[in-house]
Image (cartoon, rainbow, N blue to C red):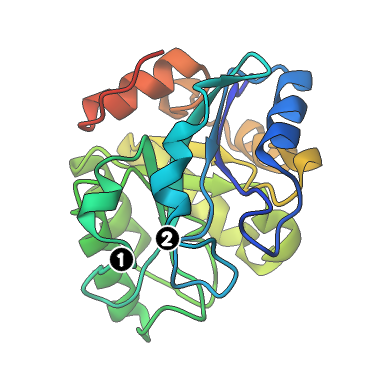
Amino acid sequence: MNILVDTHTHTSCSSHAFGTIWENMRCASERGLEAVCMTNHAPAMPDSPHLWHFTTMYELPDYIEGVRLLKGCEANVMDPGGRLDMDDGYLKKMDVVVASIHPPCYDGSGLDDHTETWINVLKNPYVNIIGHSGDPRYPYDIDKVVRCAKEYNKCIELNNHSHSVRVKSIKNCEMIARKCMEVGCFVAVSSDAHTPFDVGNFDEVKKMLRQIGFPKKLIINTTREKFIEYLNSAGRDIML
């Protein structure tokens, strides 16, 4: 199972990560990737870059080390209304937006709150992927949320990093993947790399997907062309 696009990576601009964009892209090239999404934390996270990072990142070239660079962010979900910590004016200019719940930022409690949260996030026209939603601290109605993602043409992330830093989420991730398979919802397989050495590392998620017989056609980032075609179908205007 080849996955040639990494949809969620961090550079040292997120201060708890290590590695410049050049180092990340060099490792991506060595792994044979076709594209990488740079998705540093948005401003509500304590380690985030300055807001100006998200206005000047477009000065970076589209290709580094022969790998397509897609410029985006990992936005923080703030409350059950689905509010994010970046204005739409920033989000609509990006190539890709991952929206995730992080403990320092989110104000919500209980399954009903978390379900409402994800449904409202999925209705945001500028969000493409919901990130590491298998976190057991934030349980939600998987059936309702996955069906909503399908309805709004969004992707559910299957996050390889969760297998090392959120190990209690592994069972949830499998349940989410199985529901996506049942419903026909797209998934995005990501490394959530915080070092260059993890860019393109999808080993644990790929192992899980093989075990459950997950169909390749529902993995949105198997190739650069397929992923960019998806983003453009969701309202972006990105060149290959």
Mark toward the start of the polypeptide (2 vs 1):
2
SS for tag 1?
loop
Q: In this view, does 66 lie above or below 80?
A: above
Q: Nearer the viewer, residue 62 or 119?
A: 62
Q: Residue 150 or 45: which is nearer the viewer?
A: 45
Residue 200 in sight here? no
For residue 50, side relative to residue 192 (left or right): left
193 vs 164: above or below: above
Q: In this view, does 171 lie to the left or right of 50?
A: right
* Residue 123 appears in the figure: yes
Tell me, for residue 74, which label it has, or none. none
Report the residue at 51% width, 47% height from top: 39
Locate the C terminus and report the quarter of the image it occupies. Answer: top left
Residue drawn at 42 percent across, 23 percent down: 227
Residue 129 placed where, x, y %?
39, 46
Left or right of 41 in this view: 18: right
Give 112 or 102, whichever is nearer the viewer.
102
Residue 160 drawn above or below residue 30: below
Residue 51, label in figure: 2
Q: Where is residue 223 in the image (x, y as percent from the top left)?
A: 51, 17
Residue at x 32% of width, y 29% of height: 231
Which residue is located at x 20 percent, y 31 percent?
Answer: 235
Residue at mark 1: 84
Please identify the quarter of the rendering in which residue 107 is found: bottom left
Q: Where is residue 163 in the image (x, y as percent from the top left)?
A: 71, 55
Image quarter of the N terminus: top right
Compute the Cα span from label 2 to label 1.
14 Å
Question: What amino acid type should be assigned to the residue bearing mark 2?
Answer: Leu
Disc 1 residue crowd, few under 14, some 14–19, many 20+, Cα 10 Å: many
